[in-house]
Image: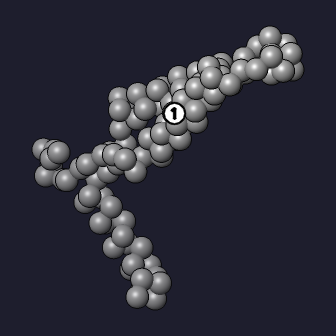
Amino acid sequence: MTTKTGSQRHTAGLFDVRNIIAALMGIYGVVLFIMGLVNFTEADKQRADNFNLNLWCGLGMFVFAVCMAAWAYLRPIVVDEQELAREKAAAEMENPNLHK
C-alpha cells in the first residue's frame, strides 16, 4: 500500500504476535475440546464435581483464539518502510562498529 507521500507501508501479517498466540490457543483449545467430548470418564466427573473441565476450558481457549485473530485482522500493525530505513541509518551512525 502506498500513501500520498510515497512511503511504502505493509502489515506485519503472519509475523504479528497476535496471530501466533491465536494459532497456539486455537490448537490447544480444539485438542482440549475434543478430549472433553471423547475422554470424559466417571472418575473425571467425580473429581471435577460434575464439570467437564477439558470441554469448557477448550471452548474458552478457542473463543479467545478467535478474538485474537479478529483483533489482528481488524487492527493490523502497519510497518512504514521509509521510517524503518531512517531508524536503521540513524542507529548505524550512532554506533557503526555494531553493524559490521
Residue located at (42% from left, 46% from top): 16
In which quadrant of the rendered view does residue 90 lie?
bottom left
Quadrant in which the C terminus is drawn: bottom left
Taking 45 as reference, is 19 left or right?
left
Residue 83 coordinates in the image, percent (x, y) = 30, 58
Residue located at (29% from left, 66% from top): 85
Q: Secondary structure at mark 1?
A: helix
Can residue 87 be spotted in the picture?
yes
Can residue 71 be spotted in the picture?
no
Residue located at (33% from left, 61% from top): 84
- For mark 1, does the 10 Å Cα neighbourhood hold few (<14), some (14 to 19), or many (20 or more) residues? many
Does residue 18 sit above or below 74 in this rendering? Answer: below
Residue type highlighted by circle 1: Gly
Quadrant in which the N terminus is drawn: top left
Residue located at (13% from left, 52% from top): 6
Taking 90 as reference, is 57 left or right?
right
Q: Which residue is mark 1?
A: 26
In which quadrant of the rendered view does residue 43 lie?
top right
In which quadrant of the rendered view does residue 49 lie?
top right
